[in-house]
Image (cartoon, rainbow, N blue to C red):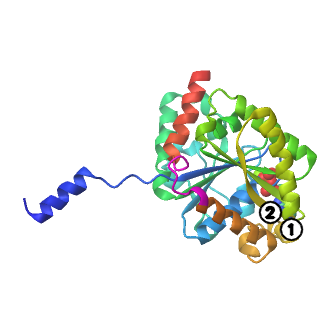
Amino acid sequence: MDQAEQLRNVIKMNPAPKPLARVITVTSGKGGVGKSNTSINLACQFKNMGYRVIILDADFGLANIEIMFGAVPRHNLSDLIYEGKDITEIITWGPMDIGFISGGSGIANMSNLSHEYLNCIIQNLAKLDANADIIIIDTGAGISDAVLDFLVASGEILVVTTPEPTSITDSYSLLKALNQHPRFSRENSSIKIVANKVSGEIEGEVMYSKLNTVVSKYLNLPVSYLGAIPQDRRLEEAVMQQMPVSMQSPNSRSAIAFEKMAYALVDKEYDKPSVKRGMAAFFSHIIAGSKKMG
Ligand SMILES: Nc1ncnc2c1ncn2[C@@H]1O[C@H](COP(=O)(O)OP(=O)(O)O)[C@@H](O)[C@H]1O
Ligand SMILES: [Mg+2]
């Protein structure tokens, strides 16, 4: 056996592992607390760090991401089925080359789709692992079955909360519903709290400790604190201009806070296999559940 042949055999025996994307799901108990801003700005920061990022907009009510991007997507997930498109054709590439997929009604009605159609979606979404290092899913707010399905399937959940008492209690209710979900696995999930619209670091820590006190006492659910984003007029201005603040005002307090948060996410557990489950596993999980229930 010559050397080249030997090498070929080695390669055959050890095929390169299929890369899996890290899937991060951003959610909240209450609307308007900053989920879409968190999703898009973390995407910008990850992109700055050299990762390929795709955002899946799974907020069926308000298609926020596209407005904040200033880019109108021509397709959404249901075009995979009804138009026979390939997933790579329905990705809109926005500023900074951040990919963006509109969920449309394709995801909202997933449990009503036939097996054949579901397979089509799963196979397509699995291809995203080859197109992104990090996939961020921006969900709707509140405790709906569709949101809980996403959260149960996620290895990694960011719960955006503001210091408003109603935001803290709504986050608690969301975590309670998640904890009671028959398919939720606390061992395989990592739940991180993001404090948004705070006056400073201390207000963020106080907010987290209020939430964590009730979560650990009544739910016995492990959550951790990811960090705080200050209330920032520059962020509001950026929203008005349909630009992520991380692009429009990279030196603003909020953009710097998002940068810090992105680094914290990457430092802590980028290489943990539990968080790099990939997109195929993610959606098989959703579908396994919806079939059992339906
Ligand atoms: N850190 C912040 N500083 C100032 N305003 C903010 C901040 N985060 C969010 N907002 C305001 O709240 C609004 C809602 O944010 P958004 O990210 O769309 O929330 P959600 O997606 O949770 O509904 C934004 O349009 C913006 O005006
Ligand atoms: Mg939103």
Please tell me whether residue 276 is drawn above or below residue 120 in the rendered image. Answer: below
The region drawn magenta spans 268-276
Q: Is mark 2 within 8 Å of ligand 1?
A: yes
Tell whether 78 sits left or right of 196.
left
Depth order, front residue of 193/215: 215
Q: Residues within 10 Å of mark 2 (few under 14, many from 20)?
A: many
Question: Residue beneath label 2, please?
Answer: 229
Considering the numbered disc 1 on the image, is that residue within a helix, a strand or a loop? loop
Q: Is residue 170 visible?
A: yes
Quarter of the rendering occupied by the N terminus: bottom left
Residue at which label 1 appears = 232
Task: Identify the residue shown where x is 13% and y is 60%.
Answer: 5
Mark 1 Cβ inside 8 Å of ligand 1: yes
**Please, what secondary structure does the residue beneath circle 2 have?**
strand
Q: Nearer the viewer, mark 2 or mark 1?
A: 2
On screen, residue 30 versus residue 292, left or right, reads right
Name the magenta segment's main secondary structure: loop
